[in-house]
Image (tube, helix red, strand yellow):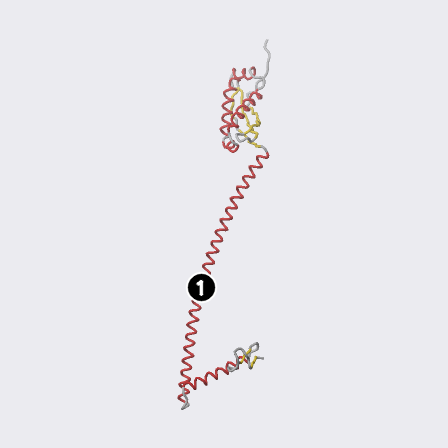
Amino acid sequence: MQAVAGTVSMRLQQLDVACETKTKDNVFLTIRVSVQFQVIDSDKGMVDSFYRLTNTRSQIESYVYDVVRSSVPKIELDDVFLTKETIAAAIATSLRDSMDDFGYQILSTPITDIDPNHEVKRSMNQINTNKRLRVAAEDEGEAGKIRAIKEAEAEACRIEIQAKADAEEKFLSGQGISRQRQAIMEGLRESVNSFKTEVAGVDAKTVMDLMIVTQYFDMMKDVGSHSKTAAVFVNAAAPKGVTTESMSGR
């Protein structure tokens, strides 16, 4: 007489295992591993998978815990993220060697998540934020330094251009004054010579005195014809600084 003792599924199965452990630098984290397994497609595999293990999932979890808790404590937190493929390969190797005897083949054991403690993640984010802020501050300082240098160079160029312009202006002004004085002297010379020619018995000094007096009265006329102007007459015989007469334009 024969009877059915049970059934064995030949489908691909997946077991998600969450294992809490700590790293070499004493940071607690949770590693989640997805184990994909299947019964070996053979009479022996089906028999072993049914009769040799009471709880397949519990057995797989035990092997995952063993590998994770023996591997991760040797690695620092930052390196866990970089070596997760190595850890996953170690889990797969351990499970394949063990579960093959129980009629199961292990197809894949990817690590799907590495979740540090909340406070640790907050600290890591803060470290990253501070690092970026420091880089930003350094960039801002460098930009400020470059801006200050460029502004100083621009100011130096402006001063140099202004100095050249002032020098050129003074040079041209000096030439103008020189030519003006030459013209005045030529005019005076012609006036003196003409006066001496037309008026007999008058020497050059007399003519110059007369011209100076004429210019003096012309100047007084200009002073008197403008408002907000004043002239102070000082007696040559009086003490220095004592005024005797004054006139202001009205």
Q: Position of residue 79 (x, y in %)?
A: 50, 32
Classify mark 1: helix, strand or loop: helix
Report which quarter residue 163 is drawn in: bottom left
Q: Quadrant of the N terminus?
A: top right
Front position in the image: 217 or 35: 217
Which residue is most to the front?
A: 239
Pointer 1: what residue? 163
Residue depicted at 45% across the width and 84% down the height: 209
In the picture, measured across the screen, residue 5 lies left or right of residue 206, that is right
Q: Position of residue 66 (x, y in %)?
A: 54, 23
Q: Is 23 located above or below residue 46 in the figure?
A: below
Q: Position of residue 92 (x, y in %)?
A: 51, 24
Report which quarter residue 126 is drawn in: top right
Front position in the image: 224 or 45: 224
Q: Is 27 located above or below residue 130 in the figure?
A: above
Front position in the image: 191 or 78: 191
